[in-house]
């Protein structure tokens, strides 16, 4: 299977990148933070894992080995597929996930789209002996979705999608005040994906 891809970003969406490997362009599904961390035209390298199903082969990419390993382990839980596993890593860092499982923190896990109370309980039950103990390092510094500086993360995401820095600044300034207030209050837990989508909606109306 493909262990990593290295090349130039030719297209960026909210949750995927198309990377030019020289003679072929490969679409890689990733977290919003990974997509927002690069811009079209930049060189990037992602560690990858491939999920093979009857309806197709999908490549998932991660900037760090810990994220890829966690993505693979999470899918060993009954009822958890790659979509929810990726949503987990888009909301929690690997160490935050280890901490939530170790502390049986259902509230932290149910913040993830697609995970309810029963899903959180399954994660805690089935991952307790698989993820290991938290390392104590907290959220990964490179994971923009977990950064308290959410405006910079959203701006980077918009620019990577082809908008100018000025457009990005205007879109962020035009966000709903309540959404902005909630993001500021959430700090490191601000939902960058939701903020990015809201900014894109504003740009599409302008």
Image: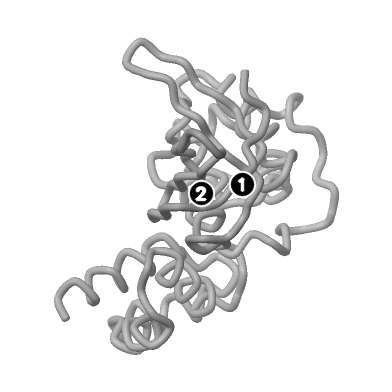
Q: Residues within 10 Å of mark 1 (few under 14, many from 20)?
A: some
Colour mapping used in the image: one colour
Name the mark on residue 105.
Answer: 1
User: Looking at this rendering, what residue extends furthest in the top direction?
Assistant: 54
Q: Image quadrant of residue 4?
A: top right
Give the number of marks: 2
Please tell me whether residue 9 is drawn above or below residue 181 in the rendered image: above
Q: Is residue 98 left or right of residue 56?
A: right
Identified at 51% across, 49% down, the residue is: 31
Q: Which residue is mark 2?
A: 31
In front here: 14 or 159? 159
Identified at 48% across, 39% down, the residue is: 28
Name the mark on residue 36.
Answer: none
Q: Residues within 10 Å of mark 2 (few under 14, many from 20)?
A: many
In front here: 52 or 137? 52
Q: Image quadrant of residue 3?
A: top right
Give the percent coordinates (x, y) of residue 84: 45, 36
Identified at 62% across, 69% down, the residue is: 147
Give the percent coordinates (x, y) of residue 104: 65, 41
Whichever of callouts 2 and 1 sits on the residue coming sooner in the sequence is 2
Q: Is residue 164 left or right of residue 8?
A: left
Label 2 residue SS: loop
Please tell me whether residue 103 is drawn above or below residue 176 in the rendered image: above
Give the percent coordinates (x, y) of residue 80: 48, 26
**How far separated are the C-alphas under marks 2 and 1?**
22 Å
């Amino acid at each position: 299977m493909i262990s990593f891809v290295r090349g130039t970003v030719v297209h960026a969406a909210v949750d995927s990148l198309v990377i030019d490997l020289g003679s072929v362009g490969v679409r890689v599904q990733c977290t919003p933070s990974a997509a927002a961390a690069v811009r079209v035209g930049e060189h990037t390298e992602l560690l990858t894992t491939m999920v093979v199903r009857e309806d197709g082969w999908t490549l998932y990419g991660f900037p760090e080995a810990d994220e890829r390993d966690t993505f693979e382990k999470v899918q060993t839980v009954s009822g958890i597929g790659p979509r929810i596993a990726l949503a987990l890593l888009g909301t929690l860092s690997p160490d935050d996930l280890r901490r939530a499982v170790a502390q049986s923190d259902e509230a932290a896990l149910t913040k993830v789209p697609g995970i309810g109370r029963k899903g959180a309980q399954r994660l805690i039950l089935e991952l307790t002996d698989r993820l290991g103990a938290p390392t104590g390092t907290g959220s990964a510094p490179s994971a923009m979705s977990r950064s308290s500086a959410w405006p910079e993360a959203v701006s980077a995401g918009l620019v990577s999608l082809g908008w100018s820095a000025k457009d990005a600044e205007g879109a962020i300034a035009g966000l709903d005040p309540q959404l902005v207030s909630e993001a500021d209050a959430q700090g490191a837990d601000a939902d960058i994906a939701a903020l990015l989508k809201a900014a894109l909606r504003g740009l599409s109306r302008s």
